[in-house]
């Protein structure tokens, strides 16, 4: 991508990128053999980029004791105050890709007057009970080839980005 200033080179860019995607179907396994099916390719990528955890923890650590003290509740109230939420909303990037829920920031902004108070309540409850909805923790993985790699049969020639819920990202920005 270093030489895309000329329009002819710019037109070649999608073709170059698509060549990497064609090669994504065939990846080299740890034993030196190559994948033959898409399912094998995905397994190789998953094993390389998401190694198994030897000591799995709970998926949703949650306390049975909510933050009930008045000091805790005041802090939560301040964090999710309407003025603060409005200010954070104005700073949201419009073209961020959505997660599995397909809710875009543009949609949140357009519906803000209708959803602000219900979201405020949900966010406060999440904070009070140290809980995050399972659907917000489910992400969409997008496989992207790294530029400048010589061997696209190597699973390390790709990176995976995780697209999470924009509602979760909004809550994180507010906090």
Image (cartoon, helix red, strand yellow):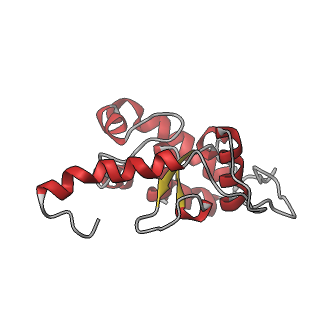
Judging depth in this view, the residue of 119 and 5 nearest the camera is 5
9 left or right, relative to 150 = left
Which residue is pictured at 77% across the width and 54% down the height? 61
Judging depth in this view, the residue of 170 and 4 nearest the camera is 4
Q: Is residue 147 above or below residue 47?
A: below
Name the image quarter holding the N terminus. Answer: bottom left
Q: How many marks?
A: 0
The answer to whether residue 78 shows anywhere in this view is no
Q: Position of residue 95 (x, y in %)?
A: 31, 46
Q: Position of residue 127 (x, y in %)?
A: 61, 53
Seen as rendered, the residue at the extreme left is: 6
Which residue is pictured at 67% across the width and 58% down the height? 28
The answer to whether residue 106 shows anywhere in this view is yes
- Answer with the quarter of the image where residue 54 lies: bottom right
Q: Position of residue 131 (x, y in %)?
A: 68, 48
Q: Position of residue 171 (x, y in %)?
A: 49, 51
Q: Is residue 172 above or below residue 117?
A: below
Which residue is pictured at 46% across the width and 34% down the height? 102
Q: Is residue 48 above or below residue 12?
A: below
86 left or right, relative to 128 = left
2 left or right, relative to 166 = left
């Amino acid at each position: 991508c270093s030489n895309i200033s000329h329009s002819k080179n710019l037109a070649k860019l999608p073709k170059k990128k698509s060549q990497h995607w064609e090669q994504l179907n065939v990846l080299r396994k740890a034993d030196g053999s190559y994948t033959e099916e898409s399912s094998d390719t995905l397994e190789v990528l998953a094993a390389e980029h998401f190694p198994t955890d030897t000591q799995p923890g709970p998926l949703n650590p949650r306390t049975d004791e909510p933050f009930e003290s008045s000091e805790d509740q005041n802090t939560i109230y301040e964090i999710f105050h309407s003025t603060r939420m409005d200010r954070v909303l104005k700073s949201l990037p419009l073209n961020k890709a959505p997660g599995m829920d397909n809710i875009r920031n543009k949609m949140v902004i357009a519906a803000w007057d209708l959803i602000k108070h219900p979201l405020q309540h949900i966010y406060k409850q999440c904070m009070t009970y140290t809980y995050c909805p399972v659907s917000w923790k489910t992400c969409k993985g997008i496989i992207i080839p790294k530029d400048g790699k010589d061997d696209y049969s190597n699973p390390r020639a790709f990176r995976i980005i995780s697209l999470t819920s924009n509602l979760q990202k909004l809550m994180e920005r507010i906090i």
